[in-house]
Image (spheres, rainbow, N blue to C red):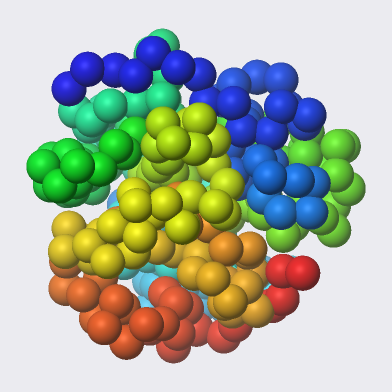
Amino acid sequence: MALIGAALTGCSNSLTDSDEKQAEEAPASSAAQQDEKESTPASGETSTSQNEDIVLSNGMIEVGNPKSVEVVVNKQRKLPEGYTPPDLTVPDVPFSFEEDHPKKQLRQEAADALEELFERSDQEGMDLVAASGYRSYERQEAIYERNVEVYGKEETDTFSASPGTSEHQTGLAMDVTSAEMAFKLTQAFGDTPEGEWLADHAYEYGFIIRYPEGDNNITGYKYEPWHLRYVGKEAAAEVHEQQVTLEEFFGYEPVGEAE
């Protein structure tokens, strides 16, 4: 598919690098919105189950299944230090920018599913473009620290993940947008034909809207209709049918309110 030769602008009053102008990195609408691990826990840490999640001394949980497409990463559940997802590839879908960049990448299974989703959406007259996928720990760290400088930590934590806790690091998340939104990531996207189509059909391809409207007290983040998370067709269908968050689906504690 051809590339869309337009830069994602995001929040122009916050971050100057186009890669940093993503929903998780800065609210576009306003400052108020937008290996399987096998190890012995270190001193002060306990394993919740054999070779699975590890409870760290600071109370955080280190996920033991980072390669699973059903892994749950949030403010309470972090990826292992140094984790890089396997089989990263660039899906053949239109992007909101032309340059080669790691943020085009997804894990192979998720990339294949995204291609199928985009093909179907195009057949039905939708105008979707991909905006931001994989981010390394280091990239997320730079983005998060910049946002803290601009917005302060309290506001930043309502829309931006601290390093190690971003879904984008899993290689299973892709932010999407449309020309109608001028390739920005805003909550208004949810009311566009593309946003409504995704809400109705993303699950058919193994994706969910990870941060639904009205569930910020559970997910810890504001509504993000653009944030697609691949979990596989079976789990996605059940999440969609039950109309629950990923935390609720897998029985994890609510993360807390994002005001």
Give coordinates of residue 14: x percent, y percent.
Answer: 77, 31
Up-down relation of residue 115 to residue 243 (above or below): above
Q: Residue 258 placed where, x, y %?
A: 72, 69
Q: Picture coordinates of residue 13 (x, y %)? A: 78, 29
On screen, residue 16 versus residue 75, left or right, reads: right
User: Viewer-proximal residue, 42 or 94?
Assistant: 94
Q: Position of residue 21 (x, y in %)?
A: 62, 31
Q: Is residue 133 shown to the viewer in this render?
A: no
Q: Residue at x 57, y 63 (%)?
A: 223
**Residue 12, above or below 247:** above
Residue drawn at x 71%, y 20% as measured from the top left: 16
Give above or below for 179 relative to 98: below
Q: Quadrant of residue 218?
A: bottom right
Q: Quadrant of the N terminus?
A: top left
Q: Is residue 13 left or right of residue 40?
A: right
Left or right of 203 in this view: 31? right
> Is residue 242 visible to us here?
yes
Label count reads 0
